[in-house]
Amino acid sequence: HVHYDYVGDFVHYLLKSVMSSPKINPLYPQSERIVEKSTHDFIVVGAGPTGSVIANRLTEIPNWSVLLLESGEEAHIISDVPFLCGAMEFTDYNWGYKSEPQQGFCRGCTGGRMELPSGNVLGGSSIINYMIYVRGNRVDYDRWAAKGNPGWSFDEVFPYFLKFEDAHISRSDEEYHHKGGFLTVSDVPYRTKAAKAYVKAAQEAGHAYTDYNGAQQLGVSYVQGTLRDGGRCSSEKAFLRPIRNRRNVKIQTGSRVEKILIDPQTKRAYGVKYSRRGRIHYAFARKEVIVTAGPLNSPQLLMLSGIGPQEHLQDLDIPVIQNLPVGITMYDHATYPGIVFRLNDSISFNDLATSLSNPSFYLEYMGGKGPITSLGGVEVMTYIRTNVSMDPEPSYPDMELFMIGGSINTDFGVIYRKIFNIPSEIYDKIWRPLEGQYVYSVLPMLVHPKSKGYIKLKSKNPYDAPKFFANYLSDPDNIDVKTFIAAIREVQKINANPAMQKYGSTLVDTPLPGCENEMFNTDRYWECCLRTLIGSLYHQVATCKMGPKSDPEAVVDPRLKVYGIKGLRVAGISVIPHPVTAHTVGPAYMIGEKAADIIKEDWKHEIRIMN
Ligand SMILES: Cc1cc2nc3c(=O)[nH]c(=O)nc-3n(C[C@H](O)[C@H](O)[C@H](O)COP(=O)(O)OP(=O)(O)OC[C@H]3O[C@@H](n4cnc5c(N)ncnc54)[C@H](O)[C@@H]3O)c2cc1C
């Protein structure tokens, strides 16, 4: 046995080096002669899904010039391979944040901390994400509107979801999808037999087969992915590549914005200060600065620029321009990776190394097919409403269960063990004995957490990572834990059905280290597991919350303008007021589309004159 830690480190090193190597034929050639001071109509900070859409749509107006500044570089084509998505976290495409150690969760994680990856690359997190495409529930958006955000109800945002979508889904509610948009959403071409059996078992357990992006979200269906021809369809591929030769857009990588320039007298944002290749530059905006720097960096940038909680900024010696509750709210979607079932037949992924060393899989991938098109093993989604839910809306899920045709042992502890910061003591006990075996797992995602965390700056140095306090499982009534446990029971119920039992599927019952004192499969046992090994699914929202002026947590108004500051908007999942019943990339694209339309509307007098 070569110790997997060394193998893992070597694999990560190799991948990191390949991914960061200079491009021979870059799609976005970067001029070395960047002027130190330049002026544009709009400056967009961050080229993730939201920033990419905004840059695309604003430059539809030929007379408007847009500078898109992205801290990361253009991605390597290897990031297109869906099966490798988990590994992207170990490259320079990740900002590499971690949560602060806190009581009550992640007691067993290495250092008591969770990984909080976030994309630092042209395309943002859509280059390192798992490509799961979910739009969210009608109720999510109707509640945004009901909470004082006019324009954001489902009926008002749905056309934007349709606008960007190019759907290739075989069993779908057709009127809920659209063909011809920039972002390809499709079925995953490869499905394990375990996934097919699980879909059947879920139906046997009473879950209807649905299109979760269609009329009804509750039920079971195969995952839909942001995939084009079996490869990743990132925001770079979908929204930037088609416009990169427009004369009125400048897409500049390796450009890290350190500060938004704001006149303290007039409170107008007039540009940004950024560093590139070790030099400081300034860019000025005639019209607006739009911050789309992701859910973790957008609040950081605002606070570094003097917009944030007054006392916190004063403590760090940052001159306060506007006292606003930036970063005081951070909801996230949590999951638990330890519900694993052993199978007695070769129906799931059992060995990543063998899969990746099989040349025929690559040939299949060239044709947009085969196991390598799998979204890191994510295959089936089930939306459920547990008996813990007190929500008045009967069709509103409180849990998502996503089924994976493998588990943390499938890659021999090289990738997913590290993603969840699982120490050797736990891996060796639970997953090591399963190496090479056929298993599947189900990860519950708590879609509407009651617990909320917050973000603080560590210092006024833009290169110091902020501090992330996730506060998972901290709600006073313990509803989050109870909901998780109800979901774990539902997973067991699904597994007990004939379609899974045909393969002798049994829950792995080795007690989790740290929880041996609790009786296996009791509520107390599962609570202990959750508090030992919970992980993030990287959907932090509300860090620059959208809300009416009366909302004490609001940072931007419903037109995404930062309260009290002129010429400055924030867009992206950071503005989402409350967690959605979705993975967040879909909503990020929608927010980009809507933001672009809002901006066009606000400047329509000028567009009219130009026409
Ligand atoms: C590992 C991972 C897996 C995920 N899996 C899924 C999934 O399967 N399905 C799903 O729906 N969602 C998933 N998500 C979430 C989803 O990808 C994000 O919600 C979405 O990308 C957010 O879009 P955004 O535009 O708001 O921000 P981001 O995608 O975070 O983009 C922000 C961009 O701004 C840049 N930036 C930040 N600070 C600066 C600065 N100071 N100067 C210049 N540029 C800056 C960043 O480098 C980045 O490119 C995942 C996220 C991660 C991290």
Image: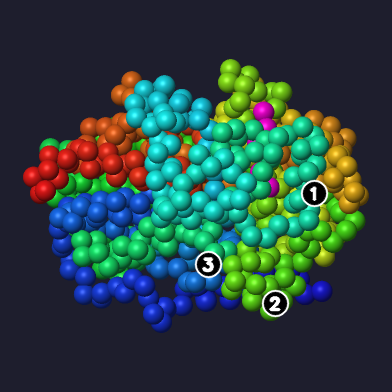
Task: Please state which of residues 212 and 349 is positioned toward the viewer in this rendering.
Answer: 212
Residue 284 vs 400, above or below: the answer is below
Name which residue type carries label 2.
Ser
Question: What residue sits right under mark 1 in the picture?
Answer: 197
Give the side of residue 103 with respect to residue 460, left or right.
right
Is ligand 1 within 8 Å of the beta carbon of the residue shown at mark 3? no
| Depth check, front residue: 15 or 470 | 15
Front position among marks 1 and 3: 1
Residue displayed at 42% across by 62% down: 237
Q: Secondary structure at mark 1?
A: helix
Mark 1 residue type: Ala
Q: Residue furthest left?
A: 609
Q: Which residues are magenta?
A: 380-385
Q: Tell me the CA gap for discs 2 and 3.
A: 20 Å
Q: Position of residue 568 (x, y in %)?
A: 24, 42
Residue under the point 72% across and 70% down: 355
Label 3 near label 1: C-beta < 8 Å? no
Q: Is residue 302 left or right of residue 176?
A: left
Could you tell me residue 71's position as x and y percent?
36, 61
Q: Main secondary structure of the magenta part?
A: strand
Query: Number of callouts in the render?
Result: 3
Secondary structure of residue under mark 3: helix
Residue corresponding to mark 3? 79
Give the alpha-carbon distance from disc 1 to disc 2, as whole Å.
25 Å
Say whether disc 1 or disc 3 marks the residue closer to the N-terminus.
3
Q: Which mark is residue 412?
A: none
Callout 1: 10 Å neighbours few (<14), some, many (20+)? many
